[in-house]
Amino acid sequence: MARLASQAKAGFFPTPDIVVSLLKTKISFEKDARALDPCCGYGNTLSRLASPDTITYGVELDHQRATKAKSQLFKAVWGDALTEARVSTQSFGLLYLNPPYDTAINPDDNSDRRLEHQFLRTYIRTLQIGGILVLVIPYYVLKACAKTLARNFKVQVTGFPDEEFSIFKQCVVFGEKSYISEEKAKATQEHLEELAGMTPEEFQSEVWPLETMAPIVIPKADRPVNFRIDRLDPLEAIPVINKAGILQDVLQELIPTKNNNIRPLTSLENGHLALMLAGGYMNGAILKDGRQLVIKGVIKKIEKIVQVHENETGGGSITTKDQYIPTVKVIDMQTAELITVQ
Ligand SMILES: C[S@@+](CC[C@H](N)C(=O)[O-])C[C@H]1O[C@@H](n2cnc3c(N)ncnc32)[C@H](O)[C@@H]1O
């Protein structure tokens, strides 16, 4: 998760404005067509591309971006599009994919795998036959994606405008999802691998610029859509909990029933305060710097093995020591952030 989170921060390379504007001139939508962006960022690119009656869906790993995307798209969810999103097959006319440009470690053999290909492979099935893939990736990643693209799509590769290309060396791949013959797939794969092996200059002069792309119409999908995520978004959950009245019950449980108005004999050191917090003497809801916080202190006892003595007959003894671990948990009731101090 730590790796995913850092990738989410670092991997935010939104489609450049000029590229979105060019795409907009090339792509139009049948009425009520559905479009999906599994790495939607703030949702800006998809919402700009869509027509007013396009039904837009997005997934985003970064919470702040996902929250903004919710206001821009018909439906956006916060979570990991590779493991947590549940999206029905063949229910989208457009798959817009500008995934993080990175590698992930394959746990089976520790080899590196391109994340762009993982997203492509995972989301191909969401496109209906005749549906359109728009894939924005660094051109050299065509090598990792060549086989999958060639087997599932009629493909056309176009170049970024030179100035934008100079930064991440991206291209735009358009693919129409189709049944492809073995022979055709093999030829396309070879062509894509060849493009991926070129120098950036060779690549840019080999492919047609985006401007020359023929216009595309995104079809309306016939199949019903199912789109949800396994992760609970606290910003959505808190109002529901509030409405259901459960929050009051939880707070009631946390607020101590006995009067803890203690008056110490001498002034307290930080250590004393920490122990009182952990001991539950300060449990309850407080308002601090405008934040509503709920505090709960817990002291957990664990048994630590300090010595193991085994004699020749197989018997022996184990010496243990009790250890007390003071923990203070604080919940910020506005953001649902949980802070644990141990
Ligand atoms: C290259 S940006 C693309 C943003 C937008 N689609 C665009 O083209 O302007 C990739 C986005 O994918 C998000 N992301 C990275 N890993 C993800 C994952 N596993 N699931 C969902 N989103 C992810 C990043 O946080 C980032 O916002």
Image (spheres, grey):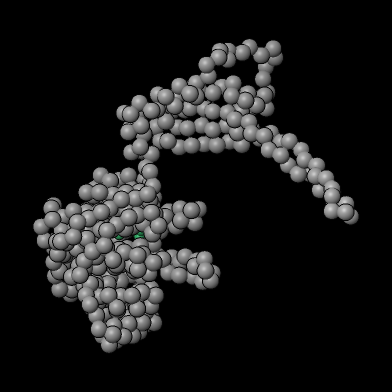
> Of 211 and 8, which appears nearest the observer?
8
Q: Does 74 sit left or right of 86 as displayed?
A: left
> Of 15 and 261, which appears nearest the observer?
261
Asked where in the image residue 54 lies, by quadrant, the reply is: bottom left
For the point 13% across and 52% down, the residue is: 52
Please say whether residue 211 is visible from this viewpoint: no
Q: Residue 30 appears at what percent x and percent y?
A: 11, 61
Asked where in the image residue 24 lies, by quadrant, the reply is: bottom left
Please say whether residue 133 is visible from this viewpoint: yes
Q: Does 204 sit left or right of 257 as displayed?
A: left
Location of residue 312 with respect to 177 vertically, above or below: above
Q: Residue 249 appears at what percent x and percent y?
A: 42, 24
For the point 38% across and 54% down, the residue is: 84
> Of 142 and 34, which appears nearest the observer?
34
For the point 67% across and 17% down, the residue is: 267
- Please state, as top left, top right, bottom left or bottom right, where the C terminus lies in the image: top right
Q: Residue 47 appears at what percent x and percent y?
A: 22, 53
Q: Residue 258 appears at what percent x and percent y?
A: 55, 14
Q: Does 301 sit left or right of 310 as displayed?
A: left
Asked where in the image residue 124 lies, by quadrant, the reply is: bottom left
For the point 39% across and 32% down, the residue is: 334
Q: Quadrant of ligand 1?
A: bottom left
